[in-house]
Image (tube, rainbow, N blue to C red):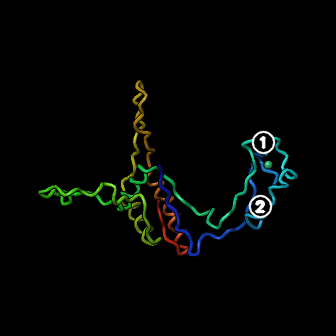
Amino acid sequence: MSVTFCPAPPAGGPVELGASLECPAYPPTDRRYFADYDAAVAGLTDHDRYCTDPDCGEHAYRPFVVVHYSTDTDPSLNVSNRNAMLLLRALGLVAELGAADVHEPPPGGATAPPPDADTPLVGELTAEQMLGRVELALALAPADAGVPVQDRGVAGTVVDFGRQAGYLQDRLIVLREVALFARDQARDVIWH
Ligand SMILES: [Zn+2]
């Protein structure tokens, strides 16, 4: 369960740049670069002329085609759901419940909306808006003291893997890179 912050796909979708073959050989010896997926599939047939790895092609170790897109090198930030909530809160993107939001259920008991109806773990902002929120959060958020790892030991129940001090600021700085990149490309910032 994780959330990725990244630039929205470019208008018209990612551009296909070409394709190559991947296999267990490391470093790879078949470094051919193909124009597209179909050419790479054709290239699979004589992969063994370029590859000397004895395990290649055996059982699970079959070479396969990897298509490369213009977006492959886009910066992105991947965090756990829990840390995504930490970030989204710092960015002011989580609607916090206040006293004014607490209502007595009406007589007759209308059902409350499901709590996750409006999950903030999926969203989109213009790069400019995201950049503004990141800068504000960096200016306002107190230094993240982190959370110590809690190890309940004996029973083996580890309830929390902790968080390094400075974690929030570090991630906000990465998110700023994502937003700057998106802005340069006139793309939005999405998270999902
Ligand atoms: Zn190979």
Task: Give how far across and how far down residue 148 sits, in percent.
Answer: 41, 38
174 or 33, nearer to the observer: 33
What distance separates the C-alpha of mark 1 from that of mark 2?
19 Å
- Residue lying at the far front of the rendered structure: 108
The extreme right residue here reads 49
Residue 184 placement: quadrant: bottom right
Q: Which mark is residue 131?
A: none
Q: Which residue is mark 2?
A: 40
Task: Give above or below for 138 relative to 163.
Answer: below
Name the amino acid, label 1: Glu
Residue under the point 77% across and 61% down: 40
In the image, residue 96 lies at what x, y percent? 28, 58
Q: Secondary structure at mark 1?
A: loop
Q: Is residue 125 left or right of residue 60?
A: left
Question: Relative to residue 2, is residue 155 depicted above or below?
Answer: above
Q: Residue at x 40, y 42 (%)?
A: 147
SS class of the residue under badge 2?
helix
Mark 2 residue's CB less than 8 Å from ligand 1: no
Image coordinates for residue 105, horizontal then vertical, percent? 16, 56
Q: Which residue is mark 1?
A: 58
- Amino acid at pointer 2: Ala
**Residue at point 52%, 63% (across, down):** 6
